[in-house]
Image (tube, rainbow, N blue to C red):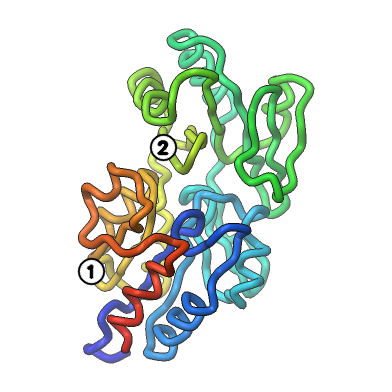
C-alpha cells in the first residue's frame, strides 16, 4: 500500500448508491472499483440489507471480501459464504418498542428480518415490500414475527411519512433501540449501538485500516454514522437532505454513476 493512495478503504452502500434499478451495477461503476482495487484500495459493501437479500448482488460483483450487512449487525465473508458475526435484536424488547410506538401514533405495519445466512424477511399484514423481486414470507398475524431470532424490525405507517415516523419512533423508543431511516418506506428498529459505522469499524480493524483512510458513499440517514466515522463522506445527488447536510462532497446520482465519477478522479 503506497502512501500516495488517496483512500485505502472504499465503503459503499448499495440501494440508491452503488446499485441502479433492478439491483444492477453499471459497467462504469464496476470498472472504477476494479481500477481502485488495482491501485491497492480495498472495497467493502456496507448495506442495510441482511445477508440473504444481498448475496446475489455480491455474486454479480465477483465480490470476495468482507461485507457489512443488516445495518451493521452482520459481518459476512463473501468468499467463504460464512457469517463471521451477527447481533440479534431481542424479540421481547422489539415487541415492547413496537407497542410503545403504536400507543403514540396508532397501528403501524411491521416486518422483520430474521437472523442467519438464510434468514427470511417476514411481513405482517399491511406491510408493503420495497423490493418485490426479493423473497419474503407473508405472516398471517404479528405473532409470527417473533417466532425466530431477528435482526431488526421494519416499520411503515398508513399516514405518517418516513421522516415523521422516524422522529416519533426516536422520541418514544430511542432509549431502547436504534431507530434509523434506511430508504423509502423503510424505518427500522435495530439493536442498541448497532450502526453501519460499528460494522465498518470491525472490517477496517480486521484490515488494519483507519477511519481517516476511508471514503464512504451513501444516500440515506442510516449512512450518517458511517460518514461521521470515515475520513470522507460522499452523498449521492439523490441523497436524503439529512445526509447531504453532513457530506464532505456530493456526486451524481446512483443512476448517473456518481460513485464512478469520484473514483475515476481519485484513482486515475
User: Do tag 1 and tag 2 residues touch (Cβ < 8 Å)?
Assistant: no
Residue 157 lies, in percent from the top left, at 52, 22
Q: x, y (%) of residue 156?
A: 54, 27
The numbered dot on residue 212 is 1
What SS does tag 2 mark?
A: strand
Residue at (48, 37) in percent of width and height: 190
Rounded to the nearest whole Å, what is the CA distance between mark 1 and mark 2? 25 Å
Name the residue rendered at 52%, 68% in the picture. 66
Q: Quadrant of the image for the C terminus?
A: bottom left
Most foreground residue, 141 or 243: 243
Q: What element carries label 1?
A: helix
Judge whether 30 appears above or below 155 on screen: below
Say which mark, if any, is on residue 180. 2
Location of residue 142 by image quarter:
top right
Q: Earlier in the sequence, mark 1 or mark 2?
A: 2
Viewer-side residue, 149 vs 164: 164
Residue 2 pos. (x, y %): 27, 91
Amino acid at each position: 500500500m503506497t502512501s500516495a493512495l488517496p483512500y485505502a478503504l472504499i465503503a459503499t452502500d448499495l440501494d440508491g448508491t452503488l446499485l441502479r434499478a433492478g439491483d444492477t451495477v453499471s459497467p462504469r461503476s464496476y470498472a472504477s472499483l476494479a481500477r481502485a482495487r488495482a491501485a491497492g484500495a480495498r472495497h467493502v459493501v456496507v448495506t442495510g440489507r441482511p445477508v440473504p437479500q444481498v448475496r446475489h448482488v455480491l455474486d454479480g460483483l465477483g465480490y470476495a471480501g468482507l461485507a457489512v450487512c443488516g445495518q451493521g449487525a452482520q459481518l459476512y465473508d463473501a468468499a467463504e459464504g460464512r457469517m463471521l458475526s451477527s447481533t440479534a435484536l431481542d424479540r421481547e424488547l422489539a415487541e415492547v418498542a413496537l407497542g410503545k410506538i403504536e400507543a403514540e401514533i396508532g397501528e403501524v405495519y411491521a416486518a422483520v428480518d430474521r437472523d442467519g445466512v438464510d434468514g427470511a424477511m417476514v411481513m405482517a399484514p399491511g406491510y408493503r415490500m420495497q423490493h418485490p423481486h426479493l423473497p419474503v414470507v407473508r405472516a398471517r398475524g404479528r405473532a409470527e414475527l417473533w417466532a425466530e431470532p431477528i435482526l431488526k424490525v421494519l416499520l411503515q405507517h398508513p399516514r405518517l411519512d418516513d421522516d415523521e415516523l422516524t422522529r416519533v419512533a426516536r422520541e418514544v423508543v430511542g432509549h431502547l433501540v436504534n431507530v434509523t431511516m434506511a430508504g423509502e418506506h423503510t424505518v427500522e428498529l435495530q439493536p442498541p449501538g448497532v450502526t453501519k459505522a460499528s460494522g465498518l469499524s470491525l472490517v477496517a480493524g480486521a484490515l488494519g485500516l483507519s477511519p481517516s483512510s476511508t471514503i464512504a458513499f451513501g444516500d440515506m440517514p442510516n449512512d450518517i454514522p458511517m460518514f461521521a466515522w470515515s475520513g470522507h463522506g460522499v452523498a449521492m445527488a439523490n441523497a436524503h437532505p439529512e445526509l447531504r447536510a453532513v457530506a464532505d462532497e456530493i456526486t451524481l446520482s446512483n443512476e448517473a454513476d456518481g460513485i464512478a465519477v469520484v473514483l475515476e478522479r481519485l484513482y486515475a
